[in-house]
Image (spheres, rainbow, N blue to C red):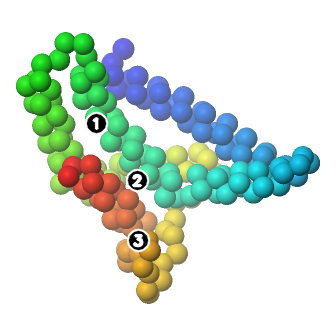
Amino acid sequence: MSLRRCVKQDGLKSMMLFKHLTHSLASLSYWKHFESSESRGSNAFSFLHAIQSSGFFVSVVVLAEFFGLTLPLAQKLQAEHMDVLEAMKFVEATLASLREQRYKSTDTFKKIFKESEKLSMEMGTQINNPRTTNLQKNRSNFNSQTFEEYYRTAVYLPFMDFIIN
């Protein structure tokens, strides 16, 4: 079985678990029967709201793409018989691949964003921009024409820059 197929199957299993998680959190958010369950219900509601946000869906798909690129490196580095020079070459090759992804960020992110939209639709939500203001100090506040442009600028590019550097 190929590595990509394994990663794809793991992704499908994770999606099934994600659906069960959201269903369970929705159920927990209505609990008010037991002692101190009211705070658990509000915590479950807050967590449910957070994982159903547009930023979460985009971030999950960005991380899945990143881990898909770095999984062969992780497996190679964990091998029993690994030569240090060979490991360094593999690290450099992975970094070169990440730099290429960063350089082609507009095209690369289109695929990621479509996958994020698909994931959000499966969960019954839509991708949208967070509210922005004229004066924002504590979080991303980019002026963008599209949702895709906003999330590429606010999530994907900073993450890639952090990983590469």
Q: Closer to the camera: disc 1 or disc 3?
A: 3
Q: Secondary structure at mark 2?
A: helix
How packed mark 2 is, by other alpha carbons closer than 10 Å (few <14, some 14-19, many 20 or more), is many
Figure quadrant of the N terminus: top left
- The picture quadrant where one finds residue 14 is top right
Question: In this figure, which residue is indicated by the disc labeled 2?
Answer: 113
Mark 2 or mark 1, which is nearer to you? 1
Residue 143 at x, y = what percent? 38, 77
Q: Tell me residue 155's x, y (percent).
A: 38, 59
Q: Residue at x 51, y 70 (%)?
A: 130
For marks 3 and 2 on the same chain, the one whose residue lies earlier in the sequence: 2
Which mark, residue 1? none
Q: Residues within 10 Å of mark 3 (few under 14, many from 20)?
A: some
- Judging by the rendered image, the residue that carries numbered circle 1 is 69
Q: How many marks?
A: 3
**Counting other residues with Cα less than 10 Å from the Cα at mark 1, is it few (<14), some (14-19), or many (20 or more)?**
some
The earlier-in-sequence mark between 1 and 3 is 1
